[in-house]
Image (cartoon, grey):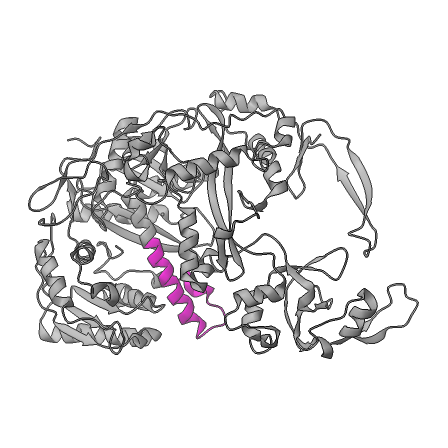
């Protein structure tokens, strides 16, 4: 009987007492390997009493017993980790279906993510369906034929050396010429073919002197294998300065090597779209797959779990949810907005924005010259007509500059172009240029140059769009373009008709910094315009180091605009897990208080964590209640049974899920001096989700968090520019990426929503 669970490193969790002391065991990898002797020690470390977990769930223990949860979590993972491919908290079956073939030597493997959570009903297993792209365990030569473009056979290995190396380097392969089928990591390709490789062979028994031997002869003499493809390069499997060259025909890719999603999308757009389609399974299909996996023999409920006397109810937990109604919204004219009851969406046909900005001084840079997607001449008229319809008067552009996409190739070219356009506009009409519309033929890496120059050096708003979309002339497209422009210029697109409830009367080189972004509203009570601050900090450090300073700056900005500091502050924080809550409370919150408090100012503060990186899904008991998509309706909130046993948290699905299965946001209240009730906070957040500036529907995440993510993305673009600029003058560019001056916004843009 299996009564132990091993974490793969140094910890064993056992359901019964194990013998302790030193033990020696002799093992061989196979009949062609030497027998090796290993000494290991078993030492009793701790007895984990489940009574402590029960005390915590009942509210009798103030801290969560993480060592017990870790042990139980490992026990629950033991069965799938023995039978499936393990990637973090996820487990995938290598038995892919024919329809899951992604081609290029890749396949989509289906599986699940799992975790244990303490909830009001006790310890809960959270399991969700997952899909990931993996390399098939093919012979290396077959994989190259499928994966490398232009590769038709072994004679192409030398010609396509760079592509072949790129496809194989870092991968694990299993050799087939030995009984033991050892696994190695590909370091690269040899410089010579098999026929030309010779090396010094040392007799392992020390009887014969070292001899020079050819690789072809060695494989025949040692392994009885005749190398068929003697004239192609071999795999270099060397490690720790020990040469190891193996012909490709004797190597097979090891099972379970994932293929990064971003690389898949670059390799083949259709394959990327197909993988995404598999991942976003409709609600009913996703529910059925989860039910199937929790009952599978290679699922979480295996023999080890039973031997630990852990039982799992394989039926999904039933909860009662409530639906918060959509708020009354206000536009310009007509004032009241009719929101679709099922999808909570509204359209702008025949309507104007709450506060449409007048655009008197703007320029157009057309980067599509000479391209097959050259911009149509009707673009300006279409844009102006839609702006006018939405209550944004828009004059003819002061400057129309036609150029090529190659301008994006260098910072100096972009900077020179923007400065010349601004200067020409100033010559034609006095006053600061409000906007530059940039039409591109495709997405380009030089986009970051454009944003960095315009937002930190020149101080002018830019709005980019693609000509292939603009040329279609669709009203909906131009409406979306206009509401982005209006928000960037400081206008308001939509407002709640009443005050917000309860207020009646935030993967690369480790030397690169992380980007911390903080946004704060500047127009209460509408709360639909935000100012942003961005700051670099140490990589992978979740704590926002300058949090208090940035918040203090935003509080002072609010005071300058409104004539008074806010008396109540609600902080929404994302990007942290439960294990980091203490850091947020004891470091970030304290840092905030110290930065803004003084003898005459002490606002009440509420701190809420918003989490999207979780596996909890909500399914309707009666699928017909969810309309065409089968998802829970917008405004669905659950705050019982599956939430924390005694703390203040809830799940809110504020958006309409038209594709796949809706994922609620988990809101966790860590600090509350404003004394929110559950209803008032839930209603506040849900209503705020209707004010997001980029669309005419509620979003899934409270807008300030969404905006902070957009600002952080912009900060990462600035970081890339800093790294590139510094790398041209220094061997190390990491120091430049920490230079705050690269991230300082132009004063003209500091307090408007340039990032939307």
Q: Quadrant of residue 623?
A: top left
Magenta stretch?
711-739
Residue at x-position 62% and y-position 27%: 306
Q: Residue furthest right?
A: 207
Examine the structure image and report whether residue 726 is included in the region drawn in magenta: yes
Between 620 and 638, the one lying in front of the other is: 620
Task: Say left or right for 315 vs 694.
Answer: right
Q: Quadrant of residue 745?
A: bottom left
User: Residue 706 location in percent, x, y?
Assistant: 31, 47
In the rendered view of the protein, which quadrant contains the C terminus? bottom left
Between 491 and 265, the one lying in front of the other is: 265
Task: Say left or right for 280 vs 60.
Answer: left
Residue 602 showing in the rendered view: no
Task: Say left or right for 119 vs 620.
Answer: right
Examine the structure image and report whether residue 404 is included in the region drawn in magenta: no
User: Relative to 306, does residue 524 appear above or below in the rendering?
Assistant: below
User: Residue 137 location in percent, x, y?
Assistant: 60, 56
Q: Quadrant of residue 21?
A: top right
User: Residue 365 location in percent, x, y?
Assistant: 21, 72
Q: Which residue lies furthest to the front in this view?
A: 98
Residue 70 showing in the rendered view: yes
In the rendered view of the protein, which quadrant contains the N terminus? top right
User: Relative to 132, does residue 396 appear above or below in the rendering?
Assistant: below
User: Relative to 361, does residue 340 appear above or below in the rendering?
Assistant: above
Residue at x-position 44% and y-position 36%: 288
Task: Say left or right for 375 vs 428.
Answer: right
Residue at x-position 11% and y-position 56%: 357
User: Residue 352 location in percent, x, y?
Assistant: 9, 50
């Amino acid at each position: 009987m299996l009564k132990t669970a091993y974490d793969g490193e140094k910890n064993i969790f056992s359901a019964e007492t194990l013998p302790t002391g030193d033990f020696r065991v002799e093992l061989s990898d196979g009949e062609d390997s030497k027998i090796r002797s290993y000494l290991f020690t078993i030492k009793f470390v701790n007895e984990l009493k489940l009574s402590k977990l029960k005390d915590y769930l009942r509210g009798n223990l103030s801290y969560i017993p993480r060592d017990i949860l870790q042990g139980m979590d490992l026990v629950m993972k033991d069965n799938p980790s023995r039978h499936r491919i393990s990637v973090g908290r996820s487990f995938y079956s290598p038995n892919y279906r024919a329809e899951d073939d992604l081609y290029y030597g890749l396949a989509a493997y289906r599986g699940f993510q799992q975790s244990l959570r303490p909830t009001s009903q006790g310890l809960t297993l959270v399991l969700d369906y997952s899909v990931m792209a993996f390399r098939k365990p093919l012979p290396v030569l077959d994989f190259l034929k499928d994966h490398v473009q232009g590769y038709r056979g072994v004679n192409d290995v030398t010609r396509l050396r760079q592509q072949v190396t790129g496809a194989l380097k870092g991968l694990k392969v299993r050799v087939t010429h030995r009984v033991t089928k050892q696994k190695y990591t590909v370091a690269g390709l040899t410089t010579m073919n098999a026929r030309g490789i010779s090396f010094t062979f040392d007799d392992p028994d020390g009887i014969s002197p070292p001899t020079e031997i050819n690789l072809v002869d060695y494989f025949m003499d040692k392994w009885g294998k005749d190398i068929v493809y003697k004239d192609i390069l071999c795999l270099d499997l060397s490690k720790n300065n020990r040469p190891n060259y193996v012909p490709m025909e004797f190597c097979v890719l090891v099972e379970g090597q994932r293929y990064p999603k971003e690389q898949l999308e670059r390799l083949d757009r259709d394959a990327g779209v197909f993988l995404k389609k598999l991942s976003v399974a409709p609600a009913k299909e996703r529910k059925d797959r989860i039910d199937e996996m929790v009952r599978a023999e290679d699922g979480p409920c295996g023999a080890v779990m039973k031997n630990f006397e852990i039982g799992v109810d394989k039926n999904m937990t039933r909860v009662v949810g409530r639906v918060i109604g959509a708020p009354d919204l206000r536009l310009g004219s007509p004032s009241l907005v009719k929101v679709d009851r099922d999808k909570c969406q509204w359209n702008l046909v025949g309507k104007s924005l709450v506060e449409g900005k007048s655009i008197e001084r703007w320029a157009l840079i057309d980067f599509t010259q000479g391209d097959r997607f050259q911009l149509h001449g009707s673009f300006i008229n279409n844009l102006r007509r839609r702006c006018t319809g939405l209550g944004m008067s828009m004059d003819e552009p002061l400057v129309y500059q036609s150029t090529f996409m190659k301008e994006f190739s260098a910072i100096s070219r972009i900077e020179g172009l923007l400065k010349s356009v601004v200067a020409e506009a100033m010559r034609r009409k006095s006053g600061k240029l409000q906007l530059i519309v940039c039409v591109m033929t495709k997405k380009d890496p030089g986009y970051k140059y454009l944003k960095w120059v315009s937002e930190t050096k020149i101080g002018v708003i830019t709005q980019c769009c693609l000509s292939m979309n603009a040329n279609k002339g669709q009203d909906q497209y131009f409406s979306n373009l206009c509401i982005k422009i209006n928000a960037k210029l400081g206008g308001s697109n939509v407002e709640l008709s009443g005050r917000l409830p309860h207020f009646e009367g935030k993967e690369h080189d480790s030397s690169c910094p992380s980007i911390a972004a903080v946004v704060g509203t500047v127009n209460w009570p509408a709360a639909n315009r935000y100012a942003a601050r961005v700051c670099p900090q140490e990589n992978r450090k979740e704590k926002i180091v300058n949090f208090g300073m940035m918040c203090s700056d935003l509080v002072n900005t609010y005071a300058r605009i409104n004539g008074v500091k806010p008396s109540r502050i609600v902080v929404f924080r994302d990007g942290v897990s439960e294990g980091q809550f203490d850091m947020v409370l004891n470091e970030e919150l304290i840092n905030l208080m110290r930065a803004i408090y003084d003898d005459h100012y002490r606002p009440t503060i509420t701190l809420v964590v918003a989490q999207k990186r979780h596996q909890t899904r909500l399914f309707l008991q009666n699928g017909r209640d969810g309309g065409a998509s089968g998802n829970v309706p917008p405004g669905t909130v659950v705050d019982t049974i599956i939430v924390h046993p005694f703390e203040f948290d809830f799940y809110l699905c504020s958006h309409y899920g038209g594709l796949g299965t809706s994922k609620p946001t988990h809101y966790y209240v860590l600090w509350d001096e404003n004394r929110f009730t559950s209803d008032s906070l839930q209603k506040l957040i849900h209503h705020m989700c209707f004010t997001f500036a980029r669309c005419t529907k509620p979003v899934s995440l409270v807008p300030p968090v969404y905006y902070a993510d957009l600002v952080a993305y912009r900060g990462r673009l600035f970081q890339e520019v800093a790294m590139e600029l510094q790398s041209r003058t220094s061997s190390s560019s990491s120091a430049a990426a920490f230079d705050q001056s690269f991230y300082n916004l132009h004063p003209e843009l500091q307090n408007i929503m340039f990032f939307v």
